[in-house]
Amino acid sequence: MRTKKNLWKLFIVLVVFPLSTDVFGNRSETSYVAKWKGNAQAAFSITIDDNGNGDSRNVQASILEEYGIQGTFFIITEPLTRYPALRQMFLDIFNRGHELGSHSVTHPRLSGANIDLIWSELTESKLFIEELTGAPCITYAAPYGDLTPNIIEVAQELYISARGINIGINEIAEGNIWNLKTAPRPTPWDAGVTWTNEQYLANLRQYVEDLLTVNGWGIEMWHNLTNDPNEPSSGPAINETVFRTFLAELTSDYGHRLWVAPQGTVARYYLERQDTTIEILALTEDVILLNLLFDGDKAIFDEPLTVVTAVPEHWLSGELTVMQNGKRLDSDYTIDVDGDKPCLLYDAIPDGSTISIVFEPNRGDLDYGVSYLAKWKNKADAALSVSFNGNGIGDNSGLTAAILEEYGIRGTFNPITSYMDEGIFLDIFRRGHELGSHGVSYTRLIGASMETIVNELTESKQAIENLTYSPCVSYTAPYGHTEHDVEVVAREIYLSVVGDREGVNAIADANIFDLQIGPVPPYYDDPETNWSNEKYCAKMSEYLEQVIKAEGWGIQVFNNLTPSGEFNNGLMITETALRTYLSEITNNLSSTVWIAPQGVVARYYLERQETTIEVLTVTGDSILLNLLFDGDKAIFDEPLTVVTVVPEHWLSGDLAVMQQDSLLDYYVEKHETEVRLVYDAMPGGGVVSILFEPTYNQR
Ligand SMILES: [Zn+2]
């Protein structure tokens, strides 16, 4: 089994550029991110500077919309603070899908300005726009095209691209997005030079042709429309006929060869593409799995990239499904650059979630793929947690933890936080045990004020989290008092609470905010009521049998090791009794019991309740599924044990179970004629793929 799994690792290959290798024989594994969206040859952005007069920008936005174009409006923000109608107009334009970029606060000349002014003009305009729209403002257009090194340095801190006023093509290889060049216009643009409509259009057409040739990015910088449609264009003003004719050509004549999008959208694509690596995870006869790895800030970089993936010739004859993280993506066929391989085009977000391309999915005659979540980890019959309450005397808690470790057990230690020895408990935590809360000051909470209850439960949790830098999710009530108000508060901040009722927690009806516990000797320091080691162990064994019978969750609570080593009562257990018990639960049980800290079992229990298995596709050699779970992933990070039915003949070849890009361990279980794989996967952790490849390594 291990050998086969290691062989699989050979097939996880990093691909940055189109690659062909013999590892896959005749298989096709080429994938790359297209230069521009939709595999277009060039990109084009329409940008409009300044605020215009009256509602002129609204008119221009409406014209763009007639041609299905989203533009970038570079606004000067200071006037918007004084004119609510102007502010509202730009917000409307944004809400209709256009981008709002910054054109500074007051449109000053910034070359030679002091650095404080540069900072305030670039920062405050950005913040104003973000406040207005609730979205990141990521593009800047420099007033007067002032982009000195000083200004660029500031822009780089705040934006992802900056546009100047120089005329030219932005070539993708050259990559200067901090002084983006613009399309030809009458120059000098502010000196009243005019072109005829024909001249203007001819120059723009040539510009687009040049863009297509070099796979570049063109940007039109516009200001106003001339009021009279017959008036010729000058630098600052463009004739409406020219404007409309050009927009019509952009969106129809060039078809898919030209991608028209706002400056910020193209900049996102450009930057994401540069920093994205394609990782081919797996190939089978029917399936290609890959990831787009990208480390940038996902709040800003959320533009889907167009991916080109070569697929085997015979896939052309059947149905294909492309999915990312369980969602279906649109796809189209194209031919690769060499003109001989069929390729798929699809848009995917570079967020590391698995993309699957599946040939002939969901064949109706296949009845496997059925999956369910095991009641307890590793399909154990029952769960058991071992907890120790209180701070102990000296290093008693640390010694107890060391004994648990001898038996391979992780326990839950519940200190009273106001006088715990932080060093001892941090050390226990670092050795893999859980720290739960047992309150701040060992206060009786029956009849206590709500304020006291809130303080006891929240401050103790906080103290432990401050110590461990990880969530404290378990509470054990002092004196076992889990009365109503305690439960109400605990439900807000913990995952589970241990009380003092003796009994088994049956999975179907467990109140995990008043968990029942195993037997505890009476709390009297009276030799008559002490339990002998034999009696204590017998009672604990009996309890464990009940837990297993109910397929439930047992919690055995202790306080400390007795210093004299002689007697067991409510507060103390002898080392002998403890070791006898630990040895029984780890070695001598006829059934399997999952032993884990309270917080780990509670996580499993809650995740399992809230997780739905969605089988995405089943083919002749693959099963893809998702564990849908909406909970907070910072807390709920316990893998669940999944059981999936697979065809028997899969056992004769190589098999891999993966989640995202990680191989998962699995084992095979046969039940009558049914073959099942058992493995642990993270709920909400991305697509799980089970892949069969019978003759892979013999090719
Ligand atoms: Zn301007």
Image: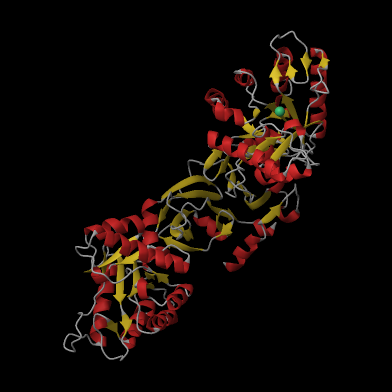
Task: State the image quarter where residue 177 is shown.
Answer: top right
Task: State the image quarter where residue 538 is shown.
Answer: bottom left
Is 488 on the left-hand or right-hand side of 642? left
Q: What is the x, y in percent for residue 315?
A: 64, 40
Q: Is residue 636 visible?
A: yes
Q: Where does ligand 1 appear, by image quarter?
A: top right
Q: What is the x, y in percent for residue 588?
A: 36, 79
Which quarter of the figure is the C terminus placed in?
bottom right
In the figure, 248 relative to 90: above or below? Answer: above
Is 615 on the left-hand or right-hand side of 545? right
In the figure, 521 relative to 377: above or below? Answer: below
376 or 462, nearer to the observer? 462
At x 18%, y 87%, the residue is: 526
Q: What is the x, y in percent for residue 289?
A: 61, 49
Q: Is residue 308 visible?
A: no
At x 27%, y 77%, the residue is: 540
552 or 189, nearer to the observer? 189
Which quarter of the figure is the N terminus placed in?
bottom right
Q: What is the x, y in percent for residue 40?
A: 72, 32
428 or 358, nearer to the observer? 428
Is 381 on the left-hand or right-hand side of 485? right
Colour pattern of the rendering: secondary structure
419 or 599, nearer to the observer? 419
